[in-house]
Amino acid sequence: MRKCFLVEFDNLEYLKSLDLQKRIREIKEEDREFQDFLFVLQHNPVFTIGRKGSREDIIVSDEILKKENIDVVFGSNNKVKIGISTRYACPSKNSKERQKLEQLLMEHGKWYEVAQLDTNAINKIIKENLWDKKIIDVFKQYVSLEESKRLYLSKIKNE
């Protein structure tokens, strides 16, 4: 299991947070063994303008931007890719729901396919409909679908 450091900021300016992410990325590019970090922060409102955009693309005045503490950031040579994945998670060990689920699997002769409630096997079975629909529907009553997101910061290749 990969581990990471959780770093929380109450409020951090957008450009400072972006600079921090860039520096961490540069370090990771040089040293793949460098620890992973998860930044949890809030920044002021930001209008981002694409690399080919201009100030004219913002229809509010500089006075309003300043009054509302809104930064305007113009495009850079960076991009962010968001990866989203979903997985079914089982009830925790020693819970009543877990005991019921294990009993259900044994009654249907399916326990051997997911011994120890292997989440990889469970996800494959549900996502690929490898069991009878009735069993999967009952099984889904005991598991929850979890979604995780990852951000990948990288450089845009020169055009």
Image (cartoon, grey):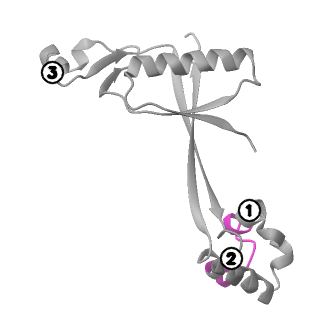
Q: Where's the N terminus, which quadrant?
A: top right
**Label 1, residues with CA under 10 Å away: few <14, some 14-19, many ≥20:** some
Query: Which residue type carries mark 1?
Result: Thr
Query: Which residue type carries mark 3?
Result: Lys
- 120 to the left or right of 7: right
Mark 2 — residue? 98
Can you say whether 142 is above or below 8 in the image?
Answer: below
Residue 44: % across, % down: 31, 27
Nearer the viewer's eye, disc 2 or disc 1?
2
Which of 42/48 is in front? 42
Mark 1 — residue? 119
Can you say whether 55 is above or below 64 in the image?
Answer: above
Which of 110/42 is in front? 42
**Label 2, residues with CA under 10 Å away: few <14, some 14-19, many ≥20:** some
Q: Residue at x 29, y 28 (%)?
A: 45
Q: Earlier in the sequence, mark 3 or mark 2?
A: 3
Mark 3 — residue? 67
Can you see residue 156?
A: no
Give the Cα distance between marks 2 and 1: 13 Å
To which quarter of the image does residue 129 belong?
A: bottom right
Q: Where's the C terminus, which quadrant?
A: top right
Q: Residue at x 25, y 12 (%)?
A: 55
Give the Cα distance between marks 1 and 3: 51 Å
The single residue placed furthest to the top in the displayed view is: 158
- 55 to the left or right of 10: left
Residue 2: % across, % down: 73, 40
Q: Is residue 82 magenta?
A: no
Which of 112/102 is in front? 102
- 15 to the left or right of 86: left
Can you see residue 8?
A: yes
**Which region of the structure is painted magenta?**
124-137
Give the Cα distance between marks 3 and 2: 54 Å
